[in-house]
Image (cartoon, rainbow, N blue to C red):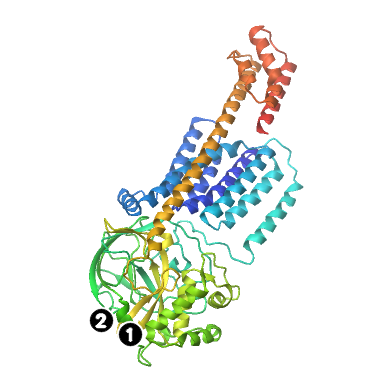
Amino acid sequence: MSRRGALLLWRAVWLGLLIWPYAVASGMPRPLLLALLPSALALAAGPGARRAALRWAAALALGLSAVLPTFDPGALRAAILAGGAHSIAVTVTGILLWLTSLLGWQVFAEATARSRLLWLWLMGTLVLALNRRIWGVGADLPTLGFLGLGVVLLAVGGDDEPVPWAAVPLAALPVLGLALAALWPQAPVATTPPGHYVRGLAGLRVAVSGAALPGKVDVNQPVTLSPAPLLVVRGAPQPTYWQEATFDTFNGVDWLEPPGPRLPLSTRSLPSPLWPPDVTGLPESTWRVQVQEVLPGSIAPLIYTGTPLGLTAETALTGGTFQPAAHALLLPGTASYTWELSVPSQPSSLLQSARDLPAGQAPAKDLAVPALLRRELGPLARTLAQGGGGPWALAQRIALYLEAHETYSPAFAPSRRDDPIGRFLLRSHKGYCDQFSTAFIMLARLDGLPARWVVGFAPGLWNGKDRIETLRAEDAHSWAEIDVAPYGWVRVDPTPGAGARPTHEPAPPAARSRGAQGAALQLAAALLLLIALVLAARIVTVRRRAGWRLRRLERDIARLARGQPSGHATWREQTLALPEAARQAAWPALELLEAAHYGERRPDGEELRRAEAGMRQARRAMRR
């Protein structure tokens, strides 16, 4: 690859780093594909119909794959119907980003002079700052990459400029400083691995494609939230929590998969109910719901609420896995399934009368606390245990304490001493649902209240008219369950904004308005991107018109040098429309063309060389 081609490719990567945070923030299911679009166009750059067709095909394929959540018309319609304005805003924003990538590529491809590179570097830094301010997305790695690569491009220079190689090591110094400032001592923000869609929370990496739960789930890492739709649930009478799996063993950093058999899933071995009910003695109702994946085949664990009684799927159940100890079913490759569920409610009046389990009845694993946490949290747990009132009252006191003293924030800073929960409760006081739910369980266990960890989805976007609930990546959630007599395992969600409300009460007003606020934010962002797109289009149009005039002069000079007819007779008008510096440099070529055309005088070799040198100077002036 020539130096010109290499620099073109690096400018394409540079533009991709600028687009990537916007693609992530807008909720696109495959943001990396949109970030790779400029690089694909750079690799297919060059003259010829074949390369032009390749560029159009790459732009269309990558754009559609990045913007559309699914190519399944039924799933796409269901997502739009359930999400309403939110889904429409995400799609519109994605299309605008795609068009912005195409227009931005024209600007970045022609930015070869240092002055234009500096202008783009400053403009891109401002855009990334606005992205963080408007959407609140931690884009440390793309920002670091854009700033650092911009410094290197400024040091190397443009296509026709000499390479000051001594400046390249100097350019690496600010890049190293930015890396230390952005990444140390915290770990980088979680990103989506190729081929998988990781849900928004660290605890829900059980939802990555595969036929088994992970051996452990780490709660000592930051997360990236995304409004991308994942699942559509039809038929539920109200929004609710949807469960995937339970964990009961915590080693201080990881929740470990419960030991037990992994049974092959088939219609002959599937009991009804699938496992003994966790709750008894509370009012129950029977639901029949259909779950459809927006990204078919991307999620293996099935979601449910209450106790599953029966399962039907569009694909054969063979090949799936039934893990009773984890209360989990995994069925890779299915995009739609239907549950019959026995769903209990949790009236506060009944739970207030709940009692502690008799001594020795609770399994030791549901009361186990790592030694370090037992020493650190023991005094706090003993303080919270004072007040009496039974297990439900104790659970509410712990949840209220967490809400009053800790702050919900996805920007969780990992602990360097492998003590994320102790650091969260005693020092940083900032975390997301994984830290809140785990801290609740540890405090409850220290006070003798059996508790376990549950992962799944909090209530999502609700369409009450059609009884459709859309579950997005940012709805992925973790919470706790406590074991109380005589009812069994009941849910407690200690994350702020959820409290200890019963399982099937409607979501609070803040949760119901979250979808409308997100849609308004997406539409506002789309409007800002539209303005940026129009400005970019104006820049491209002006530059393309001037470049077209200059290319016509270059072409006719080349024809004249080959002894061919000079062609058009409108060179003066074209030259007068050029910018001042380019017009002065191209003027000798204009005079030579007019003399050859009107005076029928054959120019000599020296005159042609001066004209060609003037055209090269005019081209450089156009790039400044």
For the residue carrying disc 1, how many other residues have a C-alpha within 10 Å: few (<14), some (14-19), or many (20+)?
many
Residue 112 seen in render: yes
Element under label 2? loop
Asked if 190 appears above or below 55 in the picture, the reply is below
| Residue 487 drawn above or below residue 342 | below
First in residue order: circle 2 vs circle 1: 2
Please identify, in this view, whether the residue under mark 2 or under mark 1 is nearer the observer.
1
Other residues around mark 2 within 10 Å, as few (<14) / some (14–19) / many (≥20): few
* Residue drawn at the location 65% of the way across and 51% of the way down: 148
Picture quadrant of residue 322? bottom left
Q: Which mark is residue 281?
A: 2
Give residue 589's quadrant in the image.
top right
Circles 2 and 1: CB distance less than 8 Å? no
Q: CA distance from mark 2 to mark 1?
A: 11 Å
Image location (x, y in percent) of residue 545: 57, 26
The correct choice, above or below, for 493 with respect to 13 in the image is below
Q: Which residue is mark 1?
A: 354
**Residue depicted at 66% across the width and 17% down the height:** 561
In the rendering, at what x and y percent does residue 537 appear? 53, 35
